[in-house]
């Protein structure tokens, strides 16, 4: 979990004195961090506090936000806590973090929470009914960021073959496609759905993505499209949904599992990567490894010979992106680390060997 706050300005408090909070959900790599970066840069003086949660043990998203050096968002306001979905660590992590934010001498105008890509949003919304925070904060809205091209390609459709294969490797699997269930839970908790990566979709793909969302949507929600999460903050904030008060209208596949569900369908691990002669040295090995092992998400930081800057690596499916974001610090050394996330059963040894 990462906490950050930005520049001073107008109060966002709503009548009754409660501070509004926005929960940003969405599958791995859909564009949540991009949306939040855009929001922080365009907050127009509103004092936002940001809580970022990650599934993998490496806190990449918070580091990326820090690396942007957004004015008014100093590093000392950023606290990392990765390695666990916020929906599973509500009592241990989320509640104390919220209380600390609210107890600040100058509390934020609006709180934005980025959940991990594997988190179920509903348990988090439920946490806003806890006595310690219910009188002080309300969920202004749940925003689901969707990877438009991936939806259009059927990534979140029920896939009986894939589920059968997973069942064979795990007798305990007692539900439908984990990706489809998670996707449905995330959109069916949302007040606003953002179909992101519009730049990567043709008109037909756009229609296919929308049609799939509408088919799975069981409640009314606004839907807009975006590229790189560039959404006007006036659209994003101020939904005034009070989501914690209408939980029963937000259906979930995990209703019966209570709050003690876990994420056994997915796993993540880290790979250390020595200094690269050039980025291509790793990229050339990564694409075949991603395809061979159906890796869902790769992200991390790398060192390249002769470069003083840190190389950020992002992979969503087999689409890779890399860029230098900030100078490497002496204590970081000249090696890199990436986190690999996929469905349970990843062949860690084979993937690590392939990237060595
Ligand atoms: N082409 C394109 N790429 C995008 C867009 N939005 C995000 N990306 C890229 O997709 C990758 C993942 O984006 P993030 O914003 O980190 O996604 P995320 O949802 O925060 O990812 P996790 O926190 O790992 O779940 C990055 O390489 C982004 O640059 C978009 O609209 N178009």
Image (cartoon, rainbow, N blue to C red):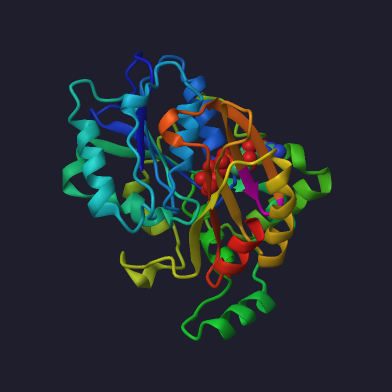
Give coordinates of residue 42: x percent, y percent. Answer: 51, 20
Which of 254 and 41 lies nearest the eye of the viewer? 41
Q: Is residue 97 above or below residue 287?
A: above
Q: Measured from the top left, where is residue 160 in percent x and y?
A: 66, 77
Decide: is 10 above or below 260.
above
Q: Is residue 122 magenta?
A: no
Q: Is residue 78 left or right of residue 323?
A: left
Highlighted range, magenta: 314-318
The picture places residue 209, in percent across and down from the top left corner, at 71, 52
Ligand 1 in which quarter: top right
Q: Main secondary structure of the magenta part?
A: strand
Question: Left or right: 70 with respect to 351?
Answer: left
Location of the C terminus by quadrant is bottom right
Q: Nearer the viewer, residue 110 or 220?
A: 110
Q: Can I make out residue 223 in this image?
A: no
Q: Is residue 83 visible?
A: yes
Q: Residue at x 62, y 68 (%)?
A: 350
Compared to residue 299, the image places residue 78 above or below, namely above
Towards the viewer: 352 or 200: 352
**Residue 262 rendering spot, x and y as whole percentages:** 39, 66
In the displayed structure, 236 sits above or below 266; it is above
Residue that appears at 46% across and 15% down: 44
């Amino acid at each position: 979990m990462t906490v950050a706050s930005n520049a001073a300005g107008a109060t966002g408090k709503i009548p009754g004195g409660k501070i509004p909070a926005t929960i940003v959900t969405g599958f791995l790599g859909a564009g949540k961090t991009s949306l939040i970066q855009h929001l922080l840069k365009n907050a127009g003086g509103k004092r936002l506090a940001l809580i970022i949660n990650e599934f993998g043990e490496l806190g990449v998203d918070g580091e990326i936000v820090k690396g942007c050096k957004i004015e008014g968002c100093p590093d000392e306001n950023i606290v990392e806590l990765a390695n666990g979905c916020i929906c599973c660590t509500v009592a241990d992590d989320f509640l104390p973090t919220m209380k600390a934010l609210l107890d600040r001498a100058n509390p934020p105008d609006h709180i934005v929470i980025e959940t991990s890509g594997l988190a179920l949003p509903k348990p988090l919304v439920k946490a806003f009914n806890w006595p310690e925070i219910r009188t002080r904060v309300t969920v202004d809205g749940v925003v689901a960021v969707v990877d438009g091209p991936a939806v259009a390609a059927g990534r979140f459709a029920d896939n009986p073959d894939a589920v059968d294969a997973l069942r064979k490797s795990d007798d305990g699997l007692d539900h439908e496609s984990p990706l489809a269930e998670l996707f449905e839970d995330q959109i069916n908790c949302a007040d606003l759905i953002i179909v992101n990566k519009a730049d990567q979709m043709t008109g037909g793909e756009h229609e296919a993505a929308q049609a799939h969302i509408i088919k799975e949507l069981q409640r009314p929600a606004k839907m807009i499209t975006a590229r790189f999460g560039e959404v006007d903050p006036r659209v994003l904030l101020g939904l005034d949904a009070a989501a914690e008060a209408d939980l029963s209208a937000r259906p979930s596949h995990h209703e019966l599992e209570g709050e003690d569900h876990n994420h056994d369908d997915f796993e993540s691990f880290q790979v250390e990567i020595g200094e690269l002669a050039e980025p291509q040295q790793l990229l050339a090995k990564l694409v075949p490894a991603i395809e061979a092992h159906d890796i869902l998400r790769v992200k991390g930081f790398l060192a390249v010979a002769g470069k003083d800057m840190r190389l950020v690596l992002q992979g969503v499916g087999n689409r890779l992106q890399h860029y230098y974001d900030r100078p490497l610090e002496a204590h970081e050394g000249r090696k890199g680390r990436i986190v690999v996330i996929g469905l349970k059963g990843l062949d860690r040894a084979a993937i690590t060997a392939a990237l060595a």
